[in-house]
Image: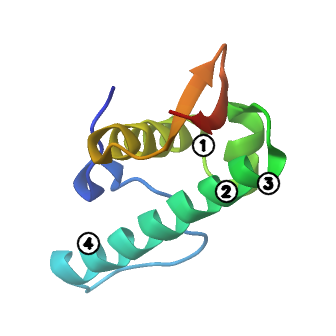
Amino acid sequence: MIGVHAADLFNLRLGNRLFVGHDRQCIQQFYNLEIKKAKAALEAILFAMGGSVSLAVLAEALEQDKETTEKLLHSLMDEYAAAGRGIRLIELEGSFQMCSS
């Protein structure tokens, strides 16, 4: 699994927002919040769908590229595994699905 930190996702596209003149800490805090929102959206989509959802569909729903979306998904997978939760996120042939542990 790929561990993802906010600094690894510094290329996360955020619409037309421009950060000229902002310090790195301010930008980092904003990205941390956006990453949490994106992960929450992924969890909601996967839970609501009940089955596997393709990476392409998830990326489109987040309005992100596939690479960024996949990093977020793998980060969620790592979080579930590390916490010993009753659910986990699995990858099946380019699609992702939530299931019980």
Residue 2 placed where, x, y %? 31, 30
Residue at the farthest top position = 93
Q: Circle 4 sits on which residue?
A: 28
Q: Camera-side residue: 90 or 61?
A: 90
Residue type at tag 3: Ala
Q: Camera-side residue: 14 or 37?
A: 37
**Left or right: residue 101 compared with residue 43:** left
Q: Circle 2 sits on which residue?
A: 62
Residue type at tag 1: Asp
Residue 31 placed where, x, y %? 37, 70
Mark 3 → mark 2, Cα distance in angstroms: 15 Å
Quadrant in the picture for the N terminus: top left
For the residues labelled 4 and 2, say whether their Cβ atoms are less than 8 Å apart: no
Labels 4, 3: front one? 3
Residue type at tag 2: Leu
Q: Circle 3 sits on which residue?
A: 48
* For residue 18, above or below residue 38: below
Quarter residue 36 falls in: bottom left
